[in-house]
Structure formats: C-alpha cells, structure tokens
Amino acid sequence: MRHLILLLLILPSFSWAMLEVPFYQSGWPKGDYQKNCKECRLEDNRLICSCEAPDKKFYKRSLDLSLCSLNIVSVKKGILHCETDLSFIPDDPVVEDDLEEEFSDSIDPADGLPLGSYRNYCEPCSIEDGILECSCKIDGWFWDSSYKATLPLESCEESDKVLYSGGLLFCSLDSFLSFHELGSSCRNCKLLKGTKLSCRCDKTPCGWSSTDIKKGRNKVAASLSSIQNCSAEIKNCNGVLRCGECRTWDYYDQTVLSRPVEGKHPRNGYCYPNSIW
C-alpha cells in the first residue's frame, strides 16, 4: 500500500517533467512568447507563431533564430524579437552628415510588393497568404548576413512605407517607434535615406527647472545611423539615440554648469537611470 501511494505521488511530477523535457531539448528557444503567442512551430530554423497585436487580433509572425545570439525570444507589440546579448552591440553609433535628404519611395509597384525603404536591404521578397516574406541583410565586419523576415500586411493600416531594422519588418515608421517605445520621449522623427533615424528627443528632467522644461530647452536633435543593423532595442539615452543599453557618459552633463540661467536652481534634482549601472 505504501508503495502504491508513493508511486501515485511520483507519477504527476514525472508526467510534467516528460512534457517539459521535449520542449527545451528539441531546439525551442526560451522566452515569454510561450505565454503570449499560440500555434507555434519551428521550420527551417525559424520560429513561426500567431501573436496578439495591440489591436487584440492575432497575426502570423516569424523570427529567424539565427539572429539570436541568446536562445531567448520575446514578443512586444505582437512582434517576435531576440533578447540581445549586449556584447555584440557596438559601443558608439556611426555619425553621419545631418544634412542628408529624406529618403523618397520611388519604387515601381509593378511587382505587387509594398513600397518602402526595406527594398534597399531585402531581396528577394514575395507575398503569400497576405504575408510579406523577404531575405534581408545585416552588415557584418567582412560580410553581409541574410535573415528571413516576415510581415503580415493585414496588421498594417498602411503598407506603403514598410521599413526594415535588425531582422524585422515594420508597417511604418510609427510602428517602428512604437516597438522601441520612443514615442513618449522623441518627436518629429524622420527616416533619412532609409537608414538613419533622426528625431528631437528629451534629455532627462533631472537638473532642469520647470520653466526650462516648458520652454523645451531640454529637447535636442538626436540621430542613429544604420538602423538596419540594429537588432537590439533603440533607446533615448538623455538625448542620445543608442542601439542597446545607455552608457554612463551619456549622463555626464547632469550638472548645474550645463544648465541655462533659469536652470541654476533646479527643482527636479539630479539622477541617473538604473539601467546604466
């Protein structure tokens, strides 16, 4: 009888273990997509799932797992993306001339593909069952690597401004900014020549007087070049756009000496974001 009771206690935990083991040992990445997406499958080193978008609808999404240096996949705004190993992110963004003209979409739509700057980096492309699928480039030191990227066109309010960044296709610049959560701190953003993000971004309120903030003195021009190569989250680091985490030196100007006259007696104090320590 004792042996029977012991066996009944062991069997449930053993059963759960049997369910868990095949998932992690069969090449499936870890990550929160397991909770927020459904109908997932692996196909040719791609993770394909149906994920919930901000409009509460589920759309078919895919991610080329060769993009992921860590075997961890997350989902944000309904888009599958790799959790980034920061050791692969360059220390400083490339600085280019700020006098570049805005990229103009002038591609002939005769092939039935949507317009957008993605065409500079993604080829070949095709549409099947309403899903745009492309082979897209990320520049390496000595070579270009290509990755499969997909975009369900049904999820796009407008699909004539598709852009590409870091292995992902976006419906528009607005959806790109929303994915990187830049809308609250950066405004008047433009995509220059399909590769350079240019915005006016807020510096931290720390050390600025309320009058200075109202007059917009803490807003500065910021840009990030080669966004097609950035597979990490893009962040506003005290008025500097970075691919990946903020740097300590982005906040070295948090001193009274760098403020206008009205900011010599700040009400907001001085602070640094926790993420840089």
Image: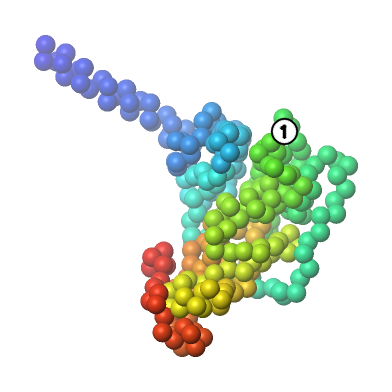
User: Which residue occupies 15% across, 16% down?
Assistant: 5
Picture quarter with the C terminus: bottom left
What crowding class fits label 1: few (fewer than 14 Cα within 10 Å), some (14-19), or many (20 or more)? few
User: Which residue occupies 68% across, 42% down?
Assistant: 156
Give the answer, above or below, for where 188 lies relative to 124: below
User: Which residue occupies 45% across, 42% down?
Assistant: 31
Picture quarter with the N terminus: top left
Left of 118 or right of it: where is 53? left
Give the answer, above or below, for where 163 lies relative to 64: below
Q: Residue 108: in sight, yes or no?
A: yes
In which image quadrant can residue 139 be found? bottom right
Left of 262 or right of it: where is 44? right
In which image quadrant can residue 20 be found? top left
Residue 172 vs residue 139, the one in the foreground: 172
Left of 100 or right of it: where is 263? left
Left of 106 or right of it: where is 256? left
Residue 268 vs residue 19, the one in the foreground: 268
User: Which residue occupies 26% across, 20% down?
Assistant: 11
Query: Can you give x and y, in whole percent of width and height, for residue 75 in the image?
Result: 51, 43
Q: Amino acid at mark 1?
A: Gly
Q: Secondary structure at mark 1?
A: loop
Query: Can you give x and y, in whole percent of width and height, for residue 177 in the image?
Result: 61, 55
Give the answer, above or below, for where 54 lies relative to 88: above
In which image quadrant can residue 240 be found? bottom right
Kindly identify which residue carries mark 1: 130
